[in-house]
Amino acid sequence: MSNVRTICPTCGHAHHWSWEEAFDKFGFGDGDDLVMTDAVADALRERGYTVTVTQWGLHNTIITDINRDGAALIPDTVTRGYDDPRKYLPKDVVDVLDREFRDGQRIDY
């Protein structure tokens, strides 16, 4: 799991997070921290993936679907919001996200 940091534009506090939180119902402090799901989705979109981001009630915003060339990349057997994305995403998607969100990297909000 990577440990990326983002500086809050409001308070200046450094928030540490990982791309995996964009798939987790309880990620980003259960939605109470800076929610960086859109940054993760945008990184995939820039590489040609179609990404669906869904507001999960009052909890969080998570990635619920990824498609490429008409193929769904999140299997139907996955319990969205709970299962570890490293275990169900294709290796090329994990590799893209690991490169884009490297350990110690600063990502602007």
Image (cartoon, rainbow, N blue to C red):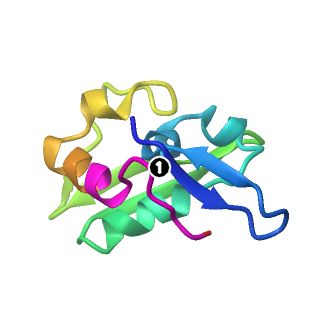
Q: Nearer the viewer, residue 42 or 103?
A: 103
Residue stretch in magenta: 97-108
Q: Secondary structure at mark 1?
A: strand
* Quadrant housing residue 83: top left
In magenta segment, residue 18 = no
Picture residue at 24% right of the left edge, 56% below the top: 96
The answer to whether residue 21 is seen in the rendering is yes
Can you say whether 34 is above or below 28 in the image? below
Q: Which residue is mark 1?
A: 63
Which residue appears at 39% of the width and 47% of the height? 103
What residue appears at the point 66 percent right and 50 percent down from the top-left corner? Answer: 15
| Left or right side of 54 for 96 | left
Q: Residue 22 in the image: state x and y as whole percent.
A: 50, 46
> As shown in the figure, which amino acid type bears the numbered disc 1?
Ile
Q: Main secondary structure of the magenta part?
A: loop
Residue 51 location (% of width, % of height): 38, 60
Residue closer to the observer: 16 or 32: 16
Residue 5 vs residue 19, the one in the foreground? 5
Residue 107 placement (x, y as % from top left) = 51, 65
Up-down relation of residue 7 to residue 26 (above or below) = below
Work out whether 69 lies above or below 87.
below
